[in-house]
Image: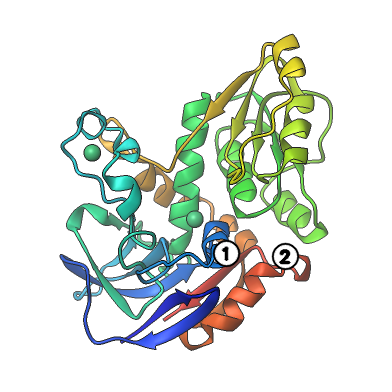
Amino acid sequence: MRAVYFEDGEVELREVTKLSGEGVRVRVRSAAICGSDLHMLDLKSPLKCVVGHEMAGVLDDGTPVAVEPSMPCWECASCRAGDYNLCAVGAGRSLGVGRDGGMADELRVPESCLVYLPSNVDVRDACLVEPLAVVVHGMHRAGLDAGQRVAVVGGGAIGLCVVAVAKAGNTTVGLSARYDHQMAAGKSLGAGEIEGQYDLVVECAGTEKAVNRAIKLCRPKGKVLILGTHWNGLPLQQIPVMMKEITIVSSFMYSTRGAVRDFDVAAILLSRHPEIAKALITHRFPLAEAKQAFAAARDRKAGAIKVVLEP
Ligand SMILES: [Zn+2]
Ligand SMILES: [Zn+2]
């Protein structure tokens, strides 16, 4: 079978004979490129495993599933409390980060990673369940309420998922995006232009400018949720944060609320709102064209939002 690796800053498609994972076989039908994949590629870090943490496929009996890449220990205090995203053991061994991920013809995963899809969700779109789950988790952390005014700073895949989740939660949403095609995608999901101040501002760009914009847009006593990843630290202007008594909310990956996983909620959202997949997926490539797919994902100006590999 074929699988995508990073080698010294280059994307490589290799022929491999053995599956490293254990458990149920998933034949991959969609695996999406994430900003963090591009970051890892740029780091030229020695990623020893197959790339890809946003993936979906079919089981041997044809059942379509999304795959949750979390690999928690299930035994530590965080895991026992249901906060398995905070498991210290699990952080370094997620699929596509520490263990073989989804940019391959197939992979094997523990049954706990399987997320069964509602019948109307196309498995070719279901790689979006992962980024949606990130947003479901973050919006829960921020305490999203119906009737709130929500602003989104950053029009990439995560920002657009925030628009979708916030609209599904009956809020008014304003979007600030760098590129016209991102704004158009946001509008198709129900976002308007930014106007006035907001109860909740979600920073999804991972830049200093975006953080400061988010703080400016936040009303006194409002909240700023940071979903952007600030690899070199978070440059925060403390004075306006203090003078408006803004609550800064952090969020990491996804876990579970009671018996329901963030992934399950995300799968239902994708089922109820087919416009999400339409707005987000701009490119599809066969696995053989992984190099071209990564080049397209990097070229945001050329219109890429979510680039999907289809083994
Ligand atoms: Zn991702
Ligand atoms: Zn644990």
Name the residue: 77% across, 52% down: 183
Ligand 2 shows up in the quarter that is: top left
In this rendering, does residue 207 appear at all? Answer: yes
Q: Secondary structure at mark 2?
A: helix
Residue 149 falls in image quadrant: top right
Q: Earlier in the sequence, mark 1 or mark 2?
A: 1
Q: Which residue was labeled with disc 1? A: 38
Position of residue 52 in the picture relative to residue 92 (left or right)? right
Residue 109 appears at what percent x and percent y? 23, 63
Q: Nearer the viewer, residue 165 or 27?
A: 27
Other-residue count near label 1 (Cα within 10 Å), few / some / many at <14 / 14–19 / ≥20: some
Its colouring scheme is rainbow
Q: Quadrant of the C terminus?
A: bottom left
Q: Quadrant of residue 61?
A: bottom left
Residue denoted by label 2: 300
Q: Compared with residue 106, is residue 252 higher up or lower down, i.e. above or below?
A: above
Q: Nearer the viewer, residue 59 or 157?
A: 157
